[in-house]
Image (cartoon, rainbow, N blue to C red):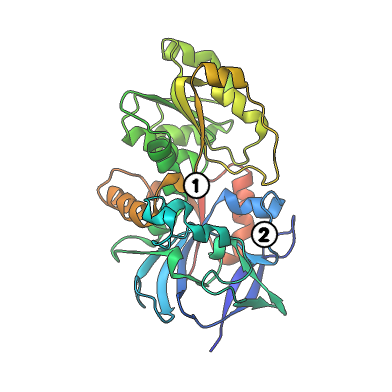
Amino acid sequence: MPKTTKAAVLWGVGEPWSIEDVELDDPHAGDVLVRMKVAGLCHSDEHAVTGDLPLPLPAIGGHEGSGVVESVGPGVTSVAPGDHVAVSFVPSCGRCRWCSGGMGYICDDGAKLFDLGMMSDGREAHHSKGHAVGRYAQVGTFAEYVLCSENSVVRAEKDLSFEALALVSCGVGTGVGSATNRAGTRPGDTVAVIGIGGIGINAIQGAKVAGAARVIGIDPIAFKREKAVEFGATHTFSSVEEAMAAVPELTWGVMCERVILSTGVVTGDLLDPALNLTAKGGTLVVTGLAPMMQQDVNLNLFMLAMLNKEVKGTIFGSGNPREVIPRLLTMYREGVLKIDELVTARYSLEEVNQGYQDMRDGKNLRGILVFD
């Protein structure tokens, strides 16, 4: 019979998250019901509040999280009740052209991420106050229970903390992968990370693990620059302009072979300064989210071509969640990656708005919601 869950729902652009009772269907074929343990307060959910990322509203927020499988629908084989799982905002069906080609991060199911209906069969399975309710990235982790597709959960070993499981599902995977998979950092490189939030701090970790000789963290907030050093940055600057004044001497004029742009909101005027920081033949990876309808970008196309630079986009650090999540958790278990240290504050579901205010105020690397 249907289950009711408390959830943080966004009813309109610019409004605060509202704690509501949401009625859920039982799992149908291909569905999984997860009892949530931890959800990450990622900046990407803020884009729904500002309207930069249009969602079908009302919608449950949250796309980063972990929990325990409560029940499964017919045909579900990869998880069973009692399993611990990371909830992946990137679905992976394992069968489409992209998944079978090793690019599960652009699985065809991604086209359904902001549909109102379930990924499995399109039905409207979430309701509150007489309205069908959407979920951010088809998961909506700001809830006591999440009803989602089997393609959106990855089973994990039970000795691992739920906080670690939650953070690898977005922030850690996206940041580390941006520096390693997408940027292709090699030993000896100089890597600059512009924007040291939940993604950028992990891009710094990724660059360090990949063997970068210099890892440069750029952020206007002193607290975040201090944290960047703790996570592997060798140099920090408060702005790209400040970095531009120092990096030529640091690198004997070479500049940065890899640059990761991971500001909270990416705007078109940020690309050209980031490319100026990028070495000849170097790579700029755009990881942060831009407003969905933004079209204009400032870019010197002559310099892009004549200096043989490249600009790449990425989602989840261009990694397959079913392969990346277990691998990152192994690195965490062996002490190669810092994950526990990412958590700056813990909140209850009812404190979700305070968590986002703290993020806006630059107080958190990653705030999390803790259930139970």
Among the 4 quarters of the image, the one containing residue 360: top right
In primary-sequence order, the first of circles 1 and 2 is: 2
Relative to residue 263, is residue 106 drawn left or right?
Answer: left
Task: Report the residue at 59% width, 30% height from top.
Answer: 220
> Can you give x and y, in whole percent of width and height, for residue 54 in the image?
69, 55
Task: Report the residue at 44% width, 80% height from top.
Answer: 73
Task: Report the residue at 65% width, 71% height from top.
Answer: 133
Look at mark 1 in the image and give the residue it sits on.
315
Look at mark 2 in the image and give the residue it sits on.
55
Q: What element carries label 2?
A: loop
Among the 4 quarters of the image, the one containing residue 272: top right
Relative to residue 177, is residue 16 drawn left or right?
Answer: right
Residue 115, compared with residue 234, is above or below; it is below
> Can you give x and y, in whole percent of width and height, for residue 230 in the image?
40, 35
Relative to residue 66, is residue 266 drawn left or right?
Answer: right
Foreground pick, 347 / 193: 193
